[in-house]
Amino acid sequence: MNRHAQPRFWVTSHLANPVRRRLRSRPARTWRPSAGVLAGIGGGAQLAAAVITAPAARHWYNRWGTTPAEAAGAMPGDDLIPHPKMASTRAVTIGAPPAEVWAWLVQIGQGRGGFYSYDVLENLARCDIHSAGRIIPELQRLHRGDLIRLAPGQAPCFRVAIAEPPRVLVLAAADPVTQAVRPVATTPDELGSTWQWLLRPVDGGRGTRLVARQRYSYPARQSVMWHLVEPVSFVMERRMLHGIKARAETHAAAGLAGAAA
C-alpha cells in the first residue's frame, strides 16, 4: 500500500464521520400544511357539497343562522334592489359590543382588511386577499361612495351606499370597468346587487347580532351563473361571519383582561 494512501483515507473518513453522525441524528423533515391550507381544503370540500346540494339546500343556506323575523324583515338597502331574483339573509351572534364588531367589518375589502374567509381559496382565483388579524386604524372610516374591491383590476367591486357606524353598512355593486355605481335595478331583469350589514345590540349591549343580506337581480341569460354563485357565496360568507365573530370576541376579551390587570 502506498504510504500516503492511509493518511488520505483516514482524513477523509475522519472528516466524513461527523457529517454522518449529524445526518443520522437529524430528524427527517416532514411537510405539514399550514392552518390556512387545511382550512382551505375544508372550505373546498364545503364548496363542492354546497354546489351539489344547492337545489335542495338553498332554502336552508339562504337563511342560515337567522330567526324568521330576521329573514323576512326589512333591512337598510333593500330599496336598491327592490325586485331581487335571488336573496339571502344570514346571521350570527357575537359576544362583543357592536362598536367592536364594526371595527372589523368596516375594514373589509381587497387591499384592505380582507374578508376573514378562506383566503387560500380566494387567492387560487387570484383575488390577492390577506385577511387582517388586527384592527387597522387607517381603515376605520368609510364614506358614501368609497370603493370596496373583491379582487384587483377589473373585478367585481362595490361602492359604499350607506355607512352608519356602528349599526349599518350597505354596499352597492359598481361596474367593474368604470367603477361607477349601477343604477337602481327597477326590474328583476336589470343587473344589480347589494351586500347589506346590520349590527343590532343584544345582551344589554354586551353582544351583537350581526345580520348579512345579499340581493341580486340579473337578466335571464345569466341565471345559470348566478345559481352557481349562490352556494359558493354561502360557504364564503358563513366563514366570514365566523371570522368576524372570532376576531371580535378575542379582541374584546383581551381588552377586558387588560382593563382588569
Image (cartoon, grey):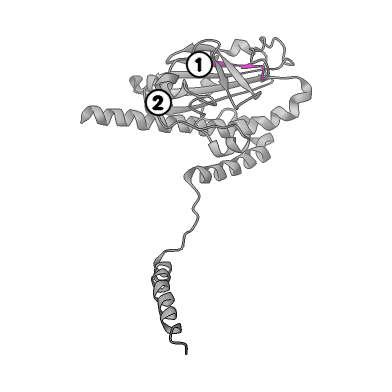
In this rendering, position of residue 198 left or right of residue 25: right
| Magenta stretch encompasses residue 171 | yes
Measuring 69% from the left and 34% from the top, which residue is drawn there?
55
Going by the numbered disc 2, the residue's amino acid type is Ile
Circle 2 sits in a helix, a strand or a loop, which is it? loop
Comparing labels 2 and 1, the label whose residue is closer to the camera? 2
Contact between marks 2 and 1 (CB within 8 A): the answer is no
Give the magenta part as a residue range: 169-176
| Magenta stretch encompasses residue 236 | no
Q: Position of residue 214 (x, y in %)?
A: 59, 22
Residue 233: name its quadrant.
top right
Say few, some or many: other residues with alpha carbon within 10 Å of mark 2 (under 14 / 14 to 19 / 20 or more): some
- Main structural element of the magenta stretch: helix, strand or loop? strand
Q: Which residue is mark 2?
A: 135
Q: Nearer the viewer, residue 162 or 215?
A: 162
Q: Is residue 100 above or below residue 129?
A: above
Residue 165: name its quadrant.
top left
Q: Position of residue 56 (x, y in %)?
A: 67, 36
The residue sitting at the left extreme is 261
Measuring 44% from the left and 83% from the top, which residue is drawn there?
4
Circle 1 sits in a helix, a strand or a loop, which is it? strand
Measuring 40% from the left and 67% from the top, which residue is drawn there?
22
Q: Which residue is mark 1?
A: 169
Q: Is residue 217 above or below residue 13?
A: above
Q: Position of residue 110 (x, y in %)?
A: 55, 26
